[in-house]
Image (cartoon, grey):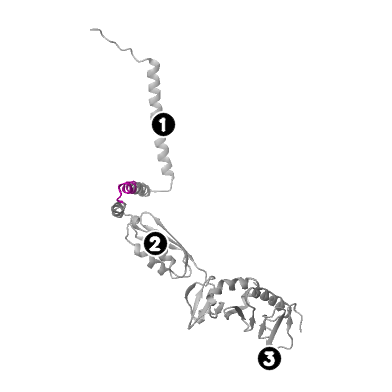
Amino acid sequence: MAKVSRKPQGVRRSAAARSRNQKVRAARKHTGGLLDRTMAALPFTDEQWHKFFLTMIVLAGVGVVATIANYAGVPDIAREELAKSASRAGFEVSKVRVSGVDRMNEELVYERVLAEQDRPMPLVELGEVRQRLLALPWVADARVSRQLPDTLKVDIVERIPHAVLRKPGRLVLIDPEGNELEPISAAAAKGKLLIGGPGAQKQVVELGKLLDAAPALKPQIAEAEWVGNRRWNLTFKTGQLLALPEGELGAPALVKFARLDGMHRLIGGKPIAIDMRVPDRAYLRCKDGPCPHGLAANGSAN
């Protein structure tokens, strides 16, 4: 039988192999050291890193199980089992953090959210929680989010109080769109714009546009009354009344009155009522009847 002999590995090849092995070991050592130094430099404790990696593992498991369940056609069953597993791992609602509440009663927010307490995080329907919050009169918008493992975060955007609406037998605080916020006492309503008259609540936005036409007059107006479902009477803090025409003529008439007041100091003067319903004239009424002179729209006395 012929004997087969193997040639010894070349010196160069052996040296190259040793060099590659040394480089691999050095790279592993350098990479591991760099990772350790990077993690040590970040402001997290070992416990926090543990929670972070545990959270990532649970979320990855959620994705895998949900995908398998959808393909298998049993998403509800899988979802329930996943929720139980998450709850056992500490992923359930035990804390609620609320921000953005300034004027409204914060307890009302907690009442709408605490229905989720002790519920597994995967079963919390954030959209439903948000809708419950939007039903509160003071809430213009709400954002609800999960902060794993156990916290629901609620950010509230409050409506802005604007005026007081006079309703039969009560006063109600409203926002610039006429949304009712809460009942208010007569004492608390002092100093706020009072709005009244049948149908006035639906005209609050238009009233705001009207008053914006003469911003210098706004701080001096105490009350606005919607008359005959077509026009406004404004009452100043001096008790004087200004009757405006209906429709689109209201804003130009208010601007004309502001100009006349600048020329003749009508607010705080002798007239107790000024009627601007006639386009080219202003009719003044004093305590004892009509004032001696009316005013033309250009400001001249008549």
The front one of 286 and 48 is 286
Residue 131 picture location, percent across and down: 42, 64
* Residue carrying label 3: 289
Badge 3, how many Cα within 10 Å: few under 14, some, many 20+? few
Residue 175 picture location, percent across and down: 52, 71
* Residue carrying label 1: 27
The front one of 73 and 64 is 73
Q: Amino acid at mark 1?
A: Ala
* Residue carrying label 2: 128
The segment highlighted magenta reads 64-74
Q: CA distance from mark 2 to mark 3?
A: 62 Å
Q: Earlier in the sequence, mark 3 or mark 1?
A: 1
In the displayed structure image, the side of residue 58 where residue 227 appears, left or right? right
Q: Residue furthest bottom?
A: 288
Q: CA distance from mark 3 to mark 1?
A: 102 Å
Q: CA distance from mark 2 to mark 1?
A: 52 Å
Q: Amino acid at mark 2?
A: Glu
Secondary structure state at the residue bearing disc 2 = helix
